[in-house]
Every structure is written in structure tokens, then in C-alpha cells.
Amino acid sequence: MSFFKPLFYALVMQIMFCNVLFSQHKQDILTKKYPPIQLRQDATVLKDVVLAMHPVVGIYRSRAYYDSLFTSYINALNDSLTEKQFRISLKQLIDYLHCGHTEIGLSKASLKAITKTKQNYSPLVFLPLQNKVYFLATTQKKYDTLLKKGAEIIRINGVSCDSMLPQIRRIISGDGYNVSGKQHYASLAFNVFYPALFGRPDTFFVEAKTNDQIKKIKYPAFQAKSFPPLPLGAKDSLFVTYKKAGMKYKYLDKNNKTLLLKIEKFSHVKYRKAYRKIFKRLEKNKTENLVIDLRNNGGGSLANAYKLLTYLMDTVSTQSLKTRIRNYPYKKHTSGNIWFKFTRFAFSRMGQHVVKNDTDIYVYAIRPIKRHHFDGKVMVLIDGGSFSASALVSAYLKYKHRASFIGEETGGALEGCNAGVTPYYILPNTKVRLRVPAFRIEHDVSAKITGYGIIPEYQIVYGIKDIFSKKDLALIKAKELLKIE
């Protein structure tokens, strides 16, 4: 046994030394500063890629505008920055693209370091609504009595909420000039965005207002690898669920006259079978009303969205998919060019291929199907989280006068978006990831560029009391209009 003791102690010392080195390396990744010359090189790659392939150039702003914008940004990079500081500044820069599919992501090394590290969060959970921030709940029961639920938060660690919200929205990508999507995601992720932008203190100092009375409190942070999900909404076990297809349904009345179809995402798999079963059921039960819930649906498969429309639309419509490139530019910074070529080929097989100037245009026809087609009344529930394929479906149903809408303006723009294929470019020095779309997807129902989403006929605004009571105001409105008790 004595022989093994020196080996055991040596092994323990080696493990401890490796852990110290790993911790130091992990810390170096998150705190390392990159000199201006490297930052300018990375920003130049971003500029070159965007100007060479991004389909939004020329939609909301001219090419000359973006050339000048990026050049000014590059010339202003005169100080060393950490990856996080550089990434936030790039997020603010790409906000001018007005494209919700363009994103700046962490380098793989930073992501790996962060996911292995517990970080400071506030145990008090905050929820922005419109332009105010409220106390929603706590992650730990011992803090339940610190504030009254629903109290308005005025300041957190000396920073006013009035100034926080605009800064958070600046780093959330959105389509056009629409703010509903930014507000939606700022509300859902405020408790993550706040520490990312304003720091992770060991102690929180919060100033709140209840019934015109100001209260100041302080409490320690808690450490976790990620922030727990918000306690919003009520669970409902009455739904029939198609998990892989990302959808579920239930009848809202005893006579099976009104069905609620919740599409959580436009899944790439199993959706055809799910739609066939659902619309067959509608036909069998002679269902008169269909309520489609697209709230918080961030999009997904175009083919899935088209399939849904074939069951609902009465006339043939078209959608145009455009790209200015035949190959990814600056291929040494990205991968997946074969997938891009396959997508171009698939689009050419799906629809008519037209070349106009330097642009390839694929025109896809959305044709109604006869079998199990639904001819009854359609209502659609939408909000700022209805984006991409959700906005596609909403645009066609609204402007073909096939449905009425309840909720909030969609996060996706009426005229279309930039998507199809969205490769990641790795910037050479910081290794920050730039997500940039390759296609412009135009909703042919819109004759002009609006910069805004689909506006519902019945707009719903939630107050903090509605959140606590877990009232689904949009669904309540749909039931009221359909005279369902």
C-alpha cells in the first residue's frame, strides 16, 4: 500500500494543477482582449460578407448606406476589446440591417467556457411589459417577502429600467422597423439580457414602487449555469399532441364546432401526417371554426408552412425566393456551400426559375388541395414571437381575406424576410460567429415594403394583473367572437 501513496499524491497534484490551468484558460477566453488591428480585420470580413451576399441590402437601405456604416464602424475600432464587448458592439451594428435572421453568436470556445461556469443571477425574477419592468416571482422562496408581486422596478444596481430596455432591444435582431418582436424577446429573456449587458454583481440593489411608495432592497445573487424558465401560462392536459410535428389541438366546445390548433414551431418532420389527421377530423366532425395559435412560434420549415396554407387558402398564390449568389463568398470563413447548392436545386424543382439581372428568382405556387380542405371560419392568434414562417402564414391568410387576427403585431414583416439557408461565418481572430441569410423570401401578397408586421384586427394588451391571473386574453377574445362560453 505504501508504494501507491506517492503515485496517488502525484496524481492528485496533477489533477489539481490541470484544473487550475483549465480555470485560468477558461478565464482567459472570457477576459482576453483583442487589439484594434484584429478587431478591424474581423469587422472587415463581416462587412465584405454582408455586402457580397446579404439579401436585405437595397431593401430598407441602399448598398452605399451600409458601405458607409460599416466603414465608419471599422475606423472607430481604436481600443482593445474582449470578445463580449466586440460581440455586443456588432449586435448593435447589425441592428441597422433590419433582419431578424441575422445574428452574432459566441465563439465556440467562449460558449464552452460559459456553459461550464456558474454565473451570478438575481433570484428575483423581472418581467418587462410595454415600457415598464415588474417583479414577477422568485427562484427561491426565502425571498418571497422582499417585494410585493407586481411591484414596478425603477432601478437595478443604480441603472434605471427606462434606460435598460432600449439598450436590450438594440441587441435583439428584428425584421424591418417592427418593435413588437424586440419587445417580446426582451420580456421573455430580460433576466438573461440584464446581467449580460450590465454586469453580474454579488449583491443586487433594487428600487421598486408599489402604490406610489418607493422601497429599496438588497439581496445576494445566486449562481447557476442558466436562468430557469419564466413561470408564465397555465398547463393544459386536454390537448392531443403531435410532439415531433410541434403541434397540438383540442376542441373548445362540447359540440366539436371549434378547434384550437396550437403550432409551436413549423417542424421539418412528421407535419404532413399530423395535418392530414387534424383536417380529416375537422371534416368528419363538420367543425365550423378553426383557431390557429401561432404565438411565440419563431418559424421553421417553409414546406410545412406551405402545406398548412394548402388546407386553408381558396385560390392559388405565389411566393418568390431570391438570391444574388451562386456560391458562398469568402468560403474560407464558412462551410455548407454544398447544402446551399442543394437548396437552390430544390427551389428550382419546387417552382419556376427566373433570372433577372444578377438575381436568381424561384417562384413557388401555393395551391389549395381538395381532400380535407377546410372551408370554415379561421381565426389566428399572433404576437411579437410570431416570426419567419409564422409571419408567412399570417400574411397570406390575412391578405387573401381567409382569416381574422387577434393579439399583437407579428415580429415577422408583412413583405417577407431573409432566410432559406443561414450559414455561419467564423470571424478569423475572435472566432465570433456571424449568421447571415442567403435568400430573400418575398410574400407576394404585399405590393410594397412596409417594414412592419401583420397587424391584428383585435389588438390585445396584457397588464401585469393578467399575467398573474394567467388569463389568455387573446383566446378569451376568440371565444367571445365565436360565442363560445
Image (cartoon, rainbow, N blue to C red):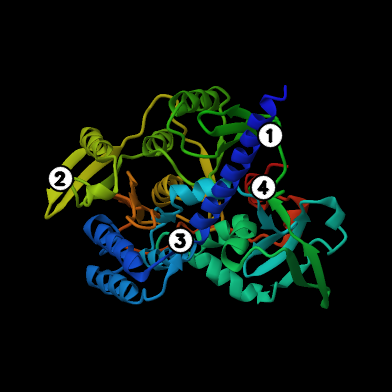
Reading the image, the residue beneath label 4 is 229
State the separation of the CA atoms marked 4 and 1.
Answer: 31 Å
Q: Are marks 4 and 1 in contact (CB under 8 Å)?
A: no
State the separation of the CA atoms marked 1 and 3.
Answer: 54 Å
Residue 212, image x, y percentages: 82, 78
* Mark 2: secondary structure: strand
Residue 257 in view in this figure = no
Relative depth, front residue between 431 and 247: 431
Residue 18 in view in this figure = yes
* Mark 3: secondary structure: helix
Q: Which mark is residue 83?
A: 3
Quadrant of the snapshot with the C terminus: top right
Q: Earlier in the sequence, mark 1 or mark 3?
A: 3
Residue flagged by tag 4: what amino acid is it?
Pro
Q: Earlier in the sequence, mark 3 or mark 4?
A: 3
Q: Which mark is residue 253?
A: 1
**For discs 4 and 1, the disc positioned in front in the rendered view:** 4
Reading the image, the residue beneath label 2 is 354
State the separation of the CA atoms marked 4 and 2.
Answer: 46 Å
**For discs 3 and 4, the disc positioned in front in the rendered view:** 3
Residue flagged by tag 2: what amino acid is it?
Val
In the rendered image, the residue lying farthest to the front is 3
Residue at left offset 70%, top offset 62%: 463
Other-residue count near label 2 (Cα within 10 Å), few / some / many at <14 / 14–19 / ≥20: few
* Mark 4: secondary structure: loop
Relative depth, front residue between 443 and 333: 333
Q: How many marks?
A: 4
Quadrant of the snapshot with the N terminus: top right
Other-residue count near label 4 (Cα within 10 Å), few / some / many at <14 / 14–19 / ≥20: few
Residue 261, image x, y percentages: 57, 36
